[in-house]
Amino acid sequence: MKKILITVLLFTSFISIAQESDDDQTKKHEISSNLFDLVVAGSLNVNYEHLFAKNQSLFLGVTFFDTYGYYDAGYLKSSNAVSLKAAYMIYFSKQKDHEGFYFYPQLKARTGEVVLDDYIYFDYENDVYIEEEYKYDVSGFSAGFGLGHKWLFNNRFTLSINGEIARNLGNFDTDYLDNIEGRFGVNFGYRF
């Protein structure tokens, strides 16, 4: 009898959940990509945001072919750098659900190196063009914060713009790179 009662309760709760319309359910997840990084630096960025109550969320992102800020974006030959970023998003709107103006503290770990076309010159003796490359390591940790604004369209698609600044922690090539890294974003996402 006890098993039948538990089965009936589970079945009725399942039926009631299944009958809720899509508009009644609050979306808890969002995936997005930074299109600005893709165009300017050639970096492929995939983000996941888990939406919590009270307009807060946890943001996790991975970037392939990462660069350091936008240093040498025009001279970039290749990059094998990969970065992982975690941020805690705080949205300030009281009327909108996870949209509008937001602030986030962030931590980032990156590993890999970037290769640049440093300069090209013509060797008259051998009658060939010679390319000189410059490599630098972008591995390390950083901490910082960002600000942005997010719009929600059709209760599914998101568009956000943001800017962030971070300070590098630990060993880093300060002969070539600064300790402060700035980045911008134009993110397009899908909420589900």
Image (cartoon, rainbow, N blue to C red):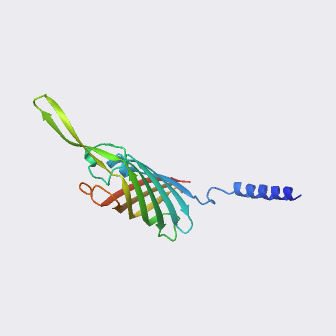
Residue 77 in the image: x percent, y percent? Answer: 29, 41
Quadrant, the N terminus: bottom right
Q: Farthest residue to the bottom: give it.
A: 94
Q: Farthest residue to the front: give it.
A: 171
- Residue nearest the observer in this picture, 48 or 67: 67
Residue shown at 60% from the left, 60% from the top: 26
The quadrant where residue 184 appears: bottom left
- Residue nearest the observer in this picture, 41 or 67: 67
Where 136 sits versus 149, above or below? above
Q: Farthest residue to the right: give it.
A: 1
Quadrant, the C terminus: bottom right
- Residue nearest the observer in this picture, 126 or 19: 126
Q: How many marks?
A: 0
Q: Farthest residue to the top: give it.
A: 126
The quadrant where residue 12 appears: bottom right
Residue 62 in the image: x percent, y percent? Answer: 44, 51
Q: Is residue 129 left or right of residue 171?
A: left
Residue shown at 13% from the left, 34% from the top: 122
- Residue nearest the observer in this picture, 179 or 36: 179
Residue 24 in the image: x percent, y percent? Answer: 63, 60
Q: Is residue 10 left or right of residue 129?
A: right
Residue shown at 30% from the left, 53% from the top: 70
Residue 139 in the image: x percent, y percent? Answer: 36, 52
Where 16 sits versus 45, above or below? below
Q: Is residue 4 left or right of residue 144?
A: right
Residue shown at 51% from the left, 66% from the top: 56
